[in-house]
């Protein structure tokens, strides 16, 4: 061969090969390798009847690319140079093989032509290989190949044959297939001569085009899914940025617009106008050989992916799914970090969740932007991480939740302050079990946050930071008009006597209610008791004062049940004290003395001690309701219904209740004491004694104690004493009498009741001692004394 030179060609054993190593080969050797095709056993007819994938396997006998690649990877952006122009002529009319060979020969340059596996006389298919006199750069290759094709007949070419990274199979034939092989030993084609045929070979608009290539592009576009309709990060990015917007935002200066509409120049290459926009700025196809997205129809996401992160795929295995490529992972991460894309993703996620769940979306226009969601930590796939920090961030910022779930310090319970996505009721209400279900569903649906423990912990943290005190807020909202009403409440509304005692009772008890509501745990262990006829409004009076925090449900005074019953109450009515046993009355007194209660508070897991925030009022229709002979100091009895009430509980009190509390709040702020003054304590004791339940034997014992006895009473025996008490002893004029100074239970049993000491049981002794404890003017001895023939006893002595 006269004309010969060394070429650089990349070769591999299969189209699927990952690496295409470069080889030095003489043109003569290369031509000789194409001389004999690999033949298989099937006929051409049988071959044509096979599927495309089956045909591809049979014709894949290895191949070559007429140039070299960076890192030996056959990718468009990795082309380093080309020594061969390779043309696929698959559109030759029937019977025109010789015509094409004549035209190739007429070029006057070195060429080899060989037929493809599908070639036949009625459907000619040829490959034309033209070596150039110097290595073409990636930018020079396509305009040179197109110009050479135009000299032969570009209309016969496959529109994709001008791709600089395109491979050519080594020749193969069916067993009956015709093989065409021609070699033209002429000087090597002048690369500069080909390019010199253009006015400006760098101007892509001058490049010859395969007729109908626009139709092919349209078909290619038609097969492409609209990128703005894609799901996930690709769709979100393409809905946020068009091709040109993405260029400006992420790779400014990488493309320059030309004078021709929809044509751009890749500034990193030497050709111009080779990047073309399609379908209203949705796609770009670049003819620039050195463009990272050369030869690819790309959307905005892939455009930026290939430019910014395409180099990351150099070591990726061939056939790696696109979503697994390093460039995709990096691009997806960057896109999710982009504020505009991330915000759109969030809004669209919320909208989808809204459609599925029927719940209101947190991304409402009236609530402004959702930038705060960008602060939620996410995993590598862009999903919100299931952390307590993320839960709290949602609760603190979601406009449908923010500030609406709180803890009421007064009631130690969860409160809802307005409409929630799962419950559109306005106004305040208590957090209930059904709210937990709605809360869990909402957090899972809109944020993907699950895990009861984390959700509960986040709820506890945020609600604890947003504490309120409903009663305190109510009291602070009031403004007193200066008219005094509190002191005369009991006489005005319930017909009690207007005196210092009744005035003090109502004033102290209401001030105690304020103190406990505001500060909690205040020492106050008293209970006013209103006693009087039915129907005068005792319970209604308390219910109106207590407003929504009134309760008359307290039936037990022991254990956690009692603590739970008073939780969230302010005014508690303890009704019908006469029906209580002495033991129950003792439980009431013990309960009243507590300043704290133990229970499990809202959103909590453990029990704790919480300050008591309520007070208690008793009501009774019976005047004798104090069971204990002593220890009634905690009860402040008030007789009501004794006079005609000046105001109506049902009509006037609802109108005045706010002013009553405003006045009371003012007294408390000024430091009102919650205890009765000494002089009024005595009046309280009189009322307690008045309402103490009397004993049947009390009158007999009183009379016994008031009867005078002889001066030598301790020296008299039992018979002498009984005779005196029965009037059987005739006293002489000189017998002196005196007041009884001391007495014991045994003495009462035998001398007052006339019973035998051997029949006196412990219960009898306790009954007598209780009666003695209730009789004024007598007190129990601190130490034992001798009581005549009764021996040493612990009894009572006259005060």
Image (spheres, rainbow, N blue to C red):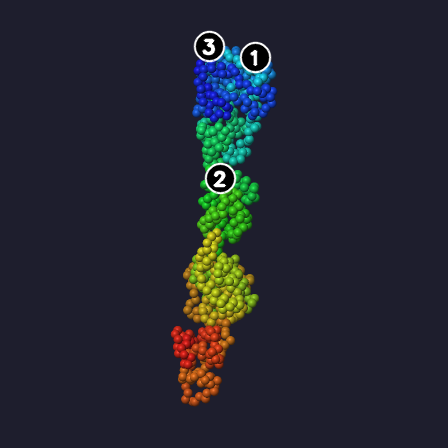
SS assignment at label 2: loop
Instruction: Tell me the distance, in whole angstroms, between the alpha carbons under discs 1 and 2.
Output: 63 Å
Residue 398, position as x, y percentages in the image: 49, 44
Dot in front, 2 or 3: 3
Local crowd at mark 3 within 10 Å, few (<14), some, or many (≥20)?
few
Above or below residue 379? Residue 665 is below
Above or below residue 275? Residue 467 is below
Quadrant in which the C terminus appears: bottom left
Dot in front, 1 or 2: 1
Task: In this rendered view, identify the residue nearer to me: 180 or 732.
Answer: 180
- Marks 3,1: beta carbons within 8 A: no
Give the labeled residue for mark 1.
Answer: 98
Q: Which mark is residue 299?
A: none
The answer to whether residue 446 of the structure is visible from this angle is yes
Residue 706, position as x, y percentages in the image: 45, 80
Residue 764, position as x, y percentages in the image: 48, 75
Please identify the quarter of the rendering in which residue 22 is found: top left
The answer to whether residue 476 of the structure is visible from this angle is no
Q: Earlier in the sequence, mark 3 or mark 1?
A: 3
Local crowd at mark 2 within 10 Å, few (<14), some, or many (≥20)?
few
Residue drawn at x 52%, y 45% as measured from the top left: 442
Residue drawn at x 49%, y 11% as measured from the top left: 185
SS assignment at label 1: helix
Local crowd at mark 1 within 10 Å, few (<14), some, or many (≥20)?
few
Instruction: Tell me the distance, in whole angstroms, between the alpha carbons under discs 2 and 3.
Output: 67 Å
Task: In this rendered view, identify the residue nearer to me: 11 or 730.
Answer: 11
Give the labeled residue for mark 2.
Answer: 383
Residue 108, position as x, y percentages in the image: 50, 11
Q: Earlier in the sequence, mark 2 or mark 3?
A: 3
Give the labeled residue for mark 3.
Answer: 2
Task: In this rendered view, identify the residue nearer to me: 679 or 444.
Answer: 444
Residue drawn at x 50%, y 59% as measured from the top left: 561
């Amino acid at each position: 061969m006269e004309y010969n030179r060394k070429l650089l060609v990349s070769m591999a054993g299969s189209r699927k090969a990952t690496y295409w190593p470069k080889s030095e080969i003489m043109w003569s050797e290369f031509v000789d390798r194409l001389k004999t095709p690999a033949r298989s056993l099937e006929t051409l007819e049988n071959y044509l009847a096979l599927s495309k994938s089956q045909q591809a396997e049979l014709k894949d006998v290895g191949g070559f690319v007429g140039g070299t690649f960076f890192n030996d990877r056959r990718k468009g952006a990795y082309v380093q140079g080309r020594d061969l122009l390779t043309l696929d002529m698959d559109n030759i009319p029937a019977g025109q093989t010789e015509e094409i060979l004549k035209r190739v020969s007429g070029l006057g340059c070195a060429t080899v032509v060989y037929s493809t596996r599908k070639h036949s006389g009625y459907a000619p298919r040829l490959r034309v290989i033209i070596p150039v006199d110097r290595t073409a750069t990636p930018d020079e290759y396509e305009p040179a190949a197109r110009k050479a094709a135009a000299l032969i007949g570009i209309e016969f070419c496959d529109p994709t044959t001008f791709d600089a990274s395109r491979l050519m199979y080594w020749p193969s034939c069916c067993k009956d297939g015709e093989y065409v092989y021609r070699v033209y030993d002429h000087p090597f084609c002048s690369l500069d001569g080909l390019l010199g045929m253009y006015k400006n070979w760098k101007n892509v608009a001058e490049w010859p085009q395969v007729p109908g290539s626009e139709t092919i592009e349209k078909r290619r576009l038609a097969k492409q899914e609209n990128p703005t309709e894609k799901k996930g990060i690709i769709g979100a990015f393409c809905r946020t940025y068009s091709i040109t917007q993405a260029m400006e935002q992420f790779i400014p200066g990488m493309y320059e617009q030309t004078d021709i509409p929809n044509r751009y120049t890749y500034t990193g290459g030497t050709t111009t106008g080779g990047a073309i926009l399609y379908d209203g700025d949705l796609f770009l196809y670049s003819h620039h050989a050195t463009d990272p997205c050369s030869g690819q129809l790309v959307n905005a996401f892939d455009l930026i992916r290939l430019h910014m992160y395409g180099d990351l795929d150099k070591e990726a295995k061939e056939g790696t799914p696109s979503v697994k490529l390093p460039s995709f992972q990096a691009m997806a991460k960057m896109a999710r970090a982009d504020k505009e894309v991330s915000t759109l993703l969030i809004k669209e996620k919320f909208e989808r969740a809204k459609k599925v769940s029927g719940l209101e979306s947190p991304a409402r226009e009236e609530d402004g932007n959702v930038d705060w969601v960008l602060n939620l930590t996410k995993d590598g796939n862009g999903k919100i991480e299931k952390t307590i920090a993320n839960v709290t961030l949602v609760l603190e910022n979601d406009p449908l939740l923010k500030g609406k779930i709180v803890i009421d310090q007064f009631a130690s319970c969860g409160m809802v302050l307005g409409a929630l996505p799962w419950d559109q009721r306005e106004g305040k209400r208590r957090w209930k079990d059904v709210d937990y279900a709605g809360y869990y569903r909402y957090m899972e649906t809109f944020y993907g946050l699950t895990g009861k423990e984390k959700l509960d912990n986040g709820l506890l943290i945020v609600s604890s930071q947003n504490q309120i005190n409903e009663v305190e807020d109510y009291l602070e909202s009031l403004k007193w008009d200066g008219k005094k009403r509190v002191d005369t409440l009991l006489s005005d509304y319930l017909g009690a006597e207007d005196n210092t005692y009744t005035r003090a009772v109502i004033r102290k008890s209401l001030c105690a209610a304020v103190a406990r509501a505001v500060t909690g745990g205040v020492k106050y262990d008293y209970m006013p008791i209103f006693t009087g006829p039915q129907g005068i409004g005792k319970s209604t009076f308390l219910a109106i004062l207590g407003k929504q925090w009134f309760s008359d449900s307290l039936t037990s005074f022991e254990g956690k049940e009692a603590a739970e019953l008073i939780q969230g109450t302010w005014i508690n009515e303890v009704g019908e004290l006469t029906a209580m046993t002495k033991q129950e009355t003792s439980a009431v007194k013990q309960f009243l003395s507590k300043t704290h209660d133990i229970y499990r508070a809202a959103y909590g897991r453990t029990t704790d001690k919480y300050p008591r925030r309520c007070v208690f009022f008793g009501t009774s229709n019976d005047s004798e309701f104090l069971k204990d002979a002593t220890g009634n100091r905690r009860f402040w009895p008030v007789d009501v219904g004794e006079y005609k009430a000046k105001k109506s509980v049902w009509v006037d009190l609802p109108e005045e209740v706010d002013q009553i509390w405003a006045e009371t709040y003012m007294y408390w702020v000024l430091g009102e004491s919650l205890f009765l003054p000494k002089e009024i304590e005595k009046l309280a004791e009189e009322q307690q004694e008045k309402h103490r339940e009397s004993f049947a034997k009390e009158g007999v014992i009183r009379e016994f104690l008031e009867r005078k006895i002889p001066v030598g009473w301790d020296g008299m025996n039992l018979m002498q004493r009984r005779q005196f008490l029965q009037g059987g002893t005739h006293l002489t004029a000189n017998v002196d009498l005196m007041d009884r100074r001391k007495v014991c239970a045994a003495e009462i049993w035998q001398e007052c009741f006339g019973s035998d000491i051997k029949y006196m049981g412990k219960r009898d002794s306790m009954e007598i001692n209780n009666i003695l404890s209730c009789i004024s003017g007598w007190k129990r001895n601190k130490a034992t004394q001798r009581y005549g023939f009764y021996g040493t006893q612990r009894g009572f002595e006259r005060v």
